[in-house]
Amino acid sequence: MRPITIPISDEVIRSLKVGDPVSLNGVMVTGRDAVHKWLFETFIAKTRLPQGDDLEVYEAIKPLLNGGVIYHCGPVVAGLDTKEYRFVAAGPTTSSREEPYQGEVMRHFNLKGVVGKGGMGAKTLQACQEVPGVYFHTIGGAASWLAQSVQRVFGVYKLEFGVPEAMWVIEVRDFPAVVTMDAHGQSQHAEIEQRSRRVLEQLIGLET
Amino acid sequence: MTPDLTPHFLELIRLAATDLPPDVEAALQRALDQEEPGSAAYGALATILKNVELSRANQTPICQDTGTPIFYVSHPEGWSTRKLRQQIETAVVQATQKSYLRPNSVDALSGKNSGNNLGGHYFPTIHFEEVEGEVLTVELMLKGGGCENVGAQYSLPYEALKAGRDLEGVRRVVLDAVYRAQGQGCAPGILGVAIGGDRGSGYYASKEVLFRRLDEENDNPELAQLEKRLTEEANRLGIGPMGFGGRTTVLGTKITALHRLPASYFVTVSYMCWAYRRRRMIWQNGRVSFE
């Protein structure tokens, strides 16, 4: 397992290949459905005017995302009353829902890594080649185990999106993942999809 | 007449969220034994089993998506379903405060999270059924969003797959659903399949059938055979744990059949992730036990 420190350089990103097991170390930000839609509409497509603390949060997360990593995760968090936050369970959510936004978010913030499960599609793979960036796959449902890699919760933005949808700024150590989409246009998900398609066609005796 | 069972409902939720049932854990262990040590599939299953152990020991959620809590309550004559609903809702709020459940109930229009897992009549979802005798049985399933999103309903005939109105047609669309899900529903999954019904009852029954244990044989020999065949063929797709490729894509298949209209022939597939969180509570003569 190769240790990777966040922020990640272009050189390190380009050296990563599909199938490489890694352990991530440094600061990550969680973000999923509400965050991606908000980032895209407010700061990229600009179809929505900034409201409330939007601009303040934008300035605060920009340096974290530059060369950084976003984690598709809606954690179970203890200490909500005291604000002494602790991650109790923190596995990945299904990444494909962010496919409409992810590539643009990567380009806009110079985001180097996306952590999630289930993989992403052609638009994100294209952005991985351009930015460059990679997709880190971690184990869906392994929430208690992954929470152990979260050393510290620095704080939270957009808690009004709800606990699962907020942006939690966390420090991780030895966070385990596998590269399944790389900066060279390779995607393990596309390959498995095509292979299983051929088996399906054989099983049902049909060329579709 | 209706005793206060709130603390027992809280325990039922804790068990479901943090302690995977033995039949599921055993199936995951068998899946691990079939994969090549060192492969991504092996690594994924080894991690999954480590997480199961850790969650049980620390009483923390197996998966952070603690899902929609779906309760099936079978109660004797004379029990107040209104009181039982209140008790279940109170236990759900307490379980959220204790971090057994993530606040998961979101207003569909405003996007606002209620913060306590309560939200209208369907969150949590509670089905009541009066039964003969003096035993109260409460079954709970926690079904996460990732696997719920890859569920599918087909109206047969389904021309694209040459699926007609027979068990061969059922087989074709179920395999298609597994292919479409890829690793997104947290494979290896468990398939709940309902043949017939209408669009509503089909989904209802496709979840209800998931309460059957993995080693339970279907009473209908034809369906028992189809269950085995579908599990075996789904595994040949090679999607594997987490979609990493590998020998196990589904751990099991459970099929039920409902009466349908002459005009309709629905096949409904509910995909349950490997974190197959379901538990049962039984109340009899004032004593409570859990399975």
Image (cartoon, coloured by chain):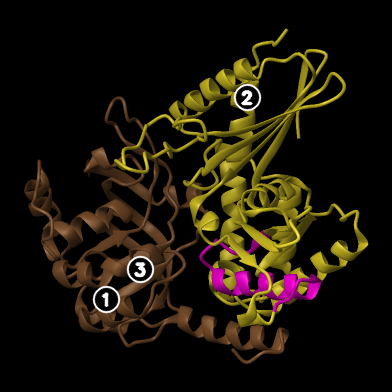
**What's under tag 2, amino acid-wise?**
Phe
Front in this rendered view, residue A137 or B215: B215
Location of residue B84 by image quarter: top right
Where disc 3 sits, the SS reads strand
Q: Is residue B179 magenta?
A: yes
Give me the C-alpha separation between circle 2 and circle 1: 46 Å
Where disc 1 sits, the SS reads loop
- Is there any visible trace of residue A65 in the rendered image? yes
Mark 1 or 3, nearer chain start: 3
**What's under tag 3, amino acid-wise?**
Pro
Q: Mark 2 packing: few (<14 Cα in 10 Å), some, or many (20+)? A: many
| Residue indicated by mark 3 | A3
Color of chain A here? brown
Residue A90 image offset from top left, x and y in percent:
42, 49
Q: Is residue A173 above or below residue B227?
A: above
Q: Are marks 2 and 3 in contact (CB under 8 Å)?
A: no
Location of residue A31 by image quarter: bottom left
Residue A22 image offset from top left, x and y in percent:
40, 70
| Residue indicated by mark 2 | B9
| Residue indicated by mark 1 | A133
- The span shown in magenta is B163-190
Front in this rendered view, residue A162 or A134: A162
Q: Is residue B104 magenta?
A: no
Q: Are marks 1 and 3 in contact (CB under 8 Å)?
A: no
**What's under tag 1, amino acid-wise?**
Gly
- Is there any visible trace of residue B182 in the rendered image? no
Residues tagged by mark 2 and mark 3 found on one chain of the structure? no
